[in-house]
Amino acid sequence: MDEEGEESWEFEVETEPVATEEDRSATDSEPVDTPTGADPGREPDSGADRGPARRPNASRHWTGVTAALAVISALSAIAIVAIHGATTPALGAAILAAGFVAIAGSSRVTEIDLVGLLADGWAEHRRYVGFSAGLFAFGGLVGATLFAAGIDLTELFFELIMEELGEGELDEGGPTGEFELSASFFIFQNTPPFLVSIAGAITLGLLTTLIMVVNGVLIGNIMFAVGVETGVGVIIALIAPHGIFELPALFIAAGVGFRLVYRAGQRLAGSRGTLFTREYVLRTAVLVVFGWLVLVLAAFVEAYLTIPIAELFFPEQAG
């Protein structure tokens, strides 16, 4: 009772402590409990489908990769003008360089982190890309074995190339004949296998496997056949400049196809509720576009720079 005879009441208001930055960091690092009845081995199949975790500093790594590819594309444009005086393909290579720059700097100028999506896409597909490279290497061993057994596929390969070129283009020849094998030619030649390697998932990966192995057989056989006549150095100089871009691009496409087959198998087995999610489509699309851009870079190098590079190191054999 107070002095005026009125009863007073004191209320204690409980307040929740304000979480500090350290508390939030500790909470974020704690594992999330699996809901009752959920399968712990089941991969996320909804909006939380982030795929396998990316490796530390993955974004920084892929930023460096795309920036390096931008520099190589820009240098290729300069070299095309300096060697051939061809401004149109040089402009194409410069535009390609701008594309790589856009990927590398997307997170700084837009809300879309393309490098992050690329890192996530690679984290999900890297094992399947490695499997694709293994199939190609196996095909290369088969091709080398065939050559050792007396089977030379070089003539067959050049016959296929002649059919692709067509008699009309071959008849033009002349000192400008080298421009007939333009970047556009190689882009149109290599894009179908790139896309089919992805679509091969429809055949449960059989078509994708066939493409990887057959390409390996041809490359392995031709490398040994030509290398015996001209030397290993020449064949490396003729394949390496564009091959270091073209082959990884094809492996990426095949890896996407194999991963899709695996996800479909999970869906059928019941360990995955949804085959396609928004996150999966986004990160896979970015990886596919990146792979195709690398394939385009390989086309510019193969059309305009491979022969000059080989002639630089082996003027007599490659000339």
Image (spheres, rainbow, N blue to C red):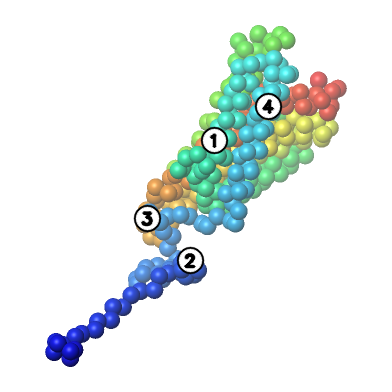
SS label for mark 4: helix
Q: Nearer the viewer, residue 82 or 132?
A: 82
Q: Could you say where residue 94 lies in the image, as x and y percent from the top left?
A: 61, 25
Asked if the residue under mark 4 is in contact with the one under mark 2, i.e. CB atoms within 8 Å, the reply is no
- Which circle, 2 or 1, is nearer the viewer? 2
Q: Could you say where residue 62 lies in the image, as x and y percent from the top left?
A: 60, 45
Quick check: can you spot residue 201?
no
Residue 1 in the figure: left or right of residue 201: left
**Residue 46's disc number:** 3
Q: Looking at the image, tell me whether mark 3 or mark 4 is earlier in sequence order.
A: 3
Mark 2, residues whose alpha carbon is within 10 Å: few (<14), some, or many (≥20)?
few
Q: Could you say where residue 49 lies in the image, as x and y percent from the top left?
A: 42, 55
Q: Nearer the viewer, residue 289 or 69?
A: 69
Residue placed under numbered mark 1 in the picture: 102
At a point 80% along the width and 24% down the height, the residue shown is 311
Residue placed under numbered mark 2 in the picture: 21
Q: Could you say where residue 226 lies in the image, as x and y percent from the top left?
A: 78, 30
The quadrant in which the N terminus is found is: bottom left
* Tag 4: amino acid: Ser
* Tag 1: amino acid: Ala
Residue placed under numbered mark 4 in the picture: 76
Decide: is 140 above or below 71. Answer: below
